[in-house]
Every structure is written in structure tokens, then in C-alpha cells.
Amino acid sequence: MRDNNTISIVGAGPGGLTAAIALKKAGYNVDVYEQNSDVGLRFNGDYQGLENWSDEQDTLELLKNIGVEINFLCRPYSGNDGCFVGPKRERIQVKTSRPLFYLIERGSGKNSLDQGLKHQALEAGVNIVWNKKIESAADNITIAGTGPKAADAIAKGIIFNASVKDQFIGFVDNRIAPKAYAYLLVNNGRATFATCMFEDFKNERRYFERALNVLKSQIDIDINSPKEFGGFVNYFTPVTKKNKILYVGENAGFQDGLWGFGIKYAMLSGYYAAQSIIKNEDYAELCKNYLFPKLRTSLANRWLFAHLTNSGYSYILKKLQNLDDIIPPLRKHYNPSFSKKIFYHIAKMWYKSRLIDKQCMHVNCNCVWCRRACVPKQNDDRISARPS
């Protein structure tokens, strides 16, 4: 039986571990229950990005302020480190006054974000219980951060070795990434290339092959020792709490509705869940004040982007190319406005999550993800099928 004076956290993802670190530093006893034998096992060492345009504050400063140290790969990429490619194969270079994003690694590798957060939690004195699911919600407060439970968008890609310079390339073209984007990230001789989709999941391999051909037409790149991977994201109007359970990360629906950059939201939600306990504040109110506005705006942006079509993508890229700094307009589009509120309400009616039970903790449940056992493991292609 668990000690009622101990805060229990379900899931050792970025949201859960950020909450654990903050709580332990504030003097709480913390038990983290992780069903796997290590962190990051749903990832394969692929590169992702911590976006750096939606806030006035630089992302690294933001992480420092919530108690997260940079003990993992975190490489800044600015406008001059890459380019964007449009539907007409036009290459667009943009200018940025600061890093556009920070490249990070996901998975169980020693330089990954996941391992970095684990080591920070252990060094702080957090107790992590491996290979164990929590069987029931505790009588005291429990934080649930078990990750996404449905595929509202998917990614299919490869990790490989490549002898090209460090760079990024972003692709927008509905023929290779329907209503989404494809991307190349290269760092220190390793590369991640993937295409993302918000629809037509059953044809993910065809879109990936098309995207790969476009990549090869844009850059002379050697693809050595490729390893396939797949991923998915779940986004919906966040559900932050139920009884004494506080939901964080994608388990709560904290996900950028447009580009799927959910890592920063996951860590922030974990931090606010911890602060609600430490300061005896309402977690739902903290999320409403600090996270919901940008999340809702991102869903409005998702609806707008989905209706641009390829000609619209080309128009936007051309406009961005002529700017002295793309950070301010990007930030503007990620902050609430009267028009974005209107588009949010339209988008909310337009998009319906494939998740049945938003409060599921994967315990004796009948949600779509548990019924079909679709939580993917390493290099698992089962996510190619859209849940019914």
C-alpha cells in the first residue's frame, strides 16, 4: 500500500518527470510508476524539436525557470541552418533573430531528453518504480502522464547515418504529407527524416516513399543503416483533472494542434501540476491561464493550415522569405486574438478526437487503445492503421 503522504505519478515521460523533479525539490516524497523497464522506449533515437517561437522567453530560459537542466542533446537551429521546400519544389530560406527550435533526441540513448530527465529525477531523490502499472487511483493526489492514447496524426520515418552537414529541411506539400509536413533533421552524422499526416493514414507508406523521393531531389544525401520508426500524437480539448487525478502531457491533451510540438507543453503541464500541489492552487485554473490560450490558438491554426491547399503553402512561404525575422509573426499567430477565437470554435466542431475515454489510465479499461492494444513499441508499424 502506498504512503498517503507520498505523491504518486503514473508514467515517466517528460510531463511526469518534470512534475516529479519540481515536487521533490519542494520537499515532497515522490513515487513514479513506469510500466516499462526504462524511459523513452516508445521512441527510437529520432530527432525532434523544442519550438522556440511561440513565447517571448527563449525556451532554454523557460526550462530553467521550471527547474529543468540541460543535460541532454539540445542543439539550436536558426534560419540559416536550413530551409523550407514548397509544393513547387521552391527552396525558401528564412531569417531568424534567435534559434527557431532546439534539436533534441528522444528514446533510451544516453543523450536523449528522456534519459536526461530521468537522471535529474533520480539525482533529486525521486523513487522510480520500474515495470509496474498503478492498479488504482490513490486516495491522495495522483499525477497521470501516460502519453497519447489515440492517433489523431501520425508520422512515418527513418533514422540513418549521413555524411552531410548539420541542417534542417521542412517540406509542405499535400502530395507527400497530407495537411501536415515532412522534415529532415541532421546532427553530427545522424539524421531523422519523416513525413507526418493528419489524414489518409492507410497510405502512409506511399506518402513516405514520395517524400523520400522529394528529399533526394533536393539534397545529395547518403542514407546508411536506415531504421524505420513510427509515431503518433493525440490532441483534443484538454482534460486536466478528475477527482484527485491530475492529467499532464498528451494524456491530458496538451499538444500543439498545428505542428505537433507537444514536448514543451508536456513539461509545462507537469510543472503546473506540481505547483498546484506545492502552492495549494487549482491545477485546472493554472492550465486555463497559462496553457489553454495557446493550445486553442494552435487548433485554430491547424484548421486554417488544413484549408490553405498547396497554392496557399507556396504563398505563405514566399511571404516568410521576404521577412527580416520570422519569429515575431510566428509568435503573433500562436497568441490569442479575436479572429483566432472564432476559428477555434469552428475547429473544435470540425475536429473530433479518436479517443473514446479521455480519462483512461489504461487500467481495466475498454478504451479503443486498450481494446486493440495499439500502443506502439520500438519500430512498430501498427500505428499505420487508423483506429476505428
Image (spheres, rainbow, N blue to C red):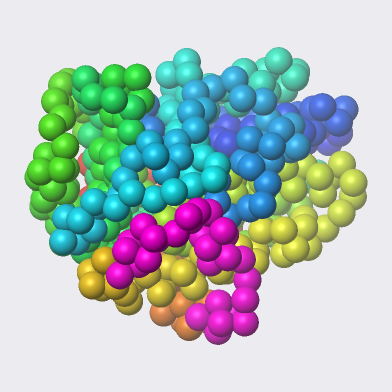
Question: In the picture provided, is 369 more to the left or to the right than 183?
Answer: right
Image coordinates of residue 282 in percent, x first then y, are 83, 58
Is residue 288 found inside the magenta-colored segment of the image?
A: no
Asked whether 328 or 336 is in front, the reply is 328
Residue found at x 10% / y 43% = 217
Instruction: Count all numbered tags in the image, as a single digit.
Output: 0
Asked whether 285 or 8 is in front, the reply is 285
Above or below, 327 against 79 in this view is below
Image coordinates of residue 201 in percent, x first then y, are 23, 58
Residue found at x 62% / y 76% = 337
Residue 193 at least partly seen: yes
Residue 368 at least partly seen: no
Question: In the picture provided, is 259 more to the left or to the right than 11?
Answer: left
Image quarter of the N terminus: top right
Image coordinates of residue 263 in percent, x first then y, are 53, 43
Asked whether 358 or 46 is in front, the reply is 46
The span picked out in magenta is: 315-343
Residue found at x 13% / y 32% = 220
Is residue 338 found inside the magenta-colored segment of the image?
A: yes
Question: In the picture provided, is 136 more to the left or to the right than 207?
Answer: right
Location of residue 152 (image quadrant): bottom left
Above or below, 211 against 22 in this view is below
Residue found at x 46% / y 69% = 301
Give the main secondary structure of the magenta stretch.
Answer: helix
Asked whether 312 or 160 is in front, the reply is 312
Image quarter of the C terminus: bottom left
Question: In the picture provided, is 67 more to the left or to the right than 199?
Answer: right
Image coordinates of residue 45 in percent, x first then y, are 37, 26
